Amino acid sequence: MVTETKDESTGAVSGVLEVPLEIAIPVAKIVPWAIFGVVIMGLAYYFVGAEQGATSLFNGMGVHEFVHDARHLLGFPCH
């Protein structure tokens, strides 16, 4: 895009070429963080939605009681 300006005293017209900057998205830097986020969200989903069932990793009701309100908030039945 060319932006033209006119000097009032001389009447000369000058142009400035504006080059749009390209913003590069560093995919190689984003992918590990995206994988990390998916793993953390998957673990959170497991502990809120499936822990204390047939796939239980921990004995007792500690995890269930810790995430009890979150289970109801997200619509998981637990009792």
Image (spheres, rainbow, N blue to C red):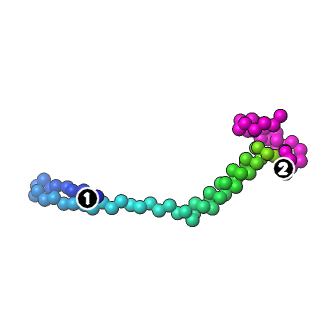
Q: Residue at x 52, y 63 (%)?
A: 26
Q: Is residue 66 above or below residue 25?
A: above
The residue range painted magenta reads 52-79
- Say which mark, if any, is on residue 55: 2
Q: Judge the density around disc 1: few (<14), some (14-19), many (≥20) Cα neighbours within 10 Å.
A: few
Q: Nearer the viewer, residue 19 or 5?
A: 19
- Mark 2 residue crowding within 10 angstroms, few (<14) / some (14–19) / many (20+): few
**Residue 11 lies within the magenta run:** no
Q: What residue would you read off at disc 1?
A: 2
Residue sitting farthest toward the right = 59
- Disc 2 residue type? Thr
Q: Earlier in the sequence, mark 2 or mark 1?
A: 1
The relative height of residue 51 versus residue 7 in the rendered view (above or below) is above
Quarter of the rendering occupied by the N terminus: bottom left
Residue at the left extreme of this rendering: 10
The amino acid pointed to by label 1 is: Val
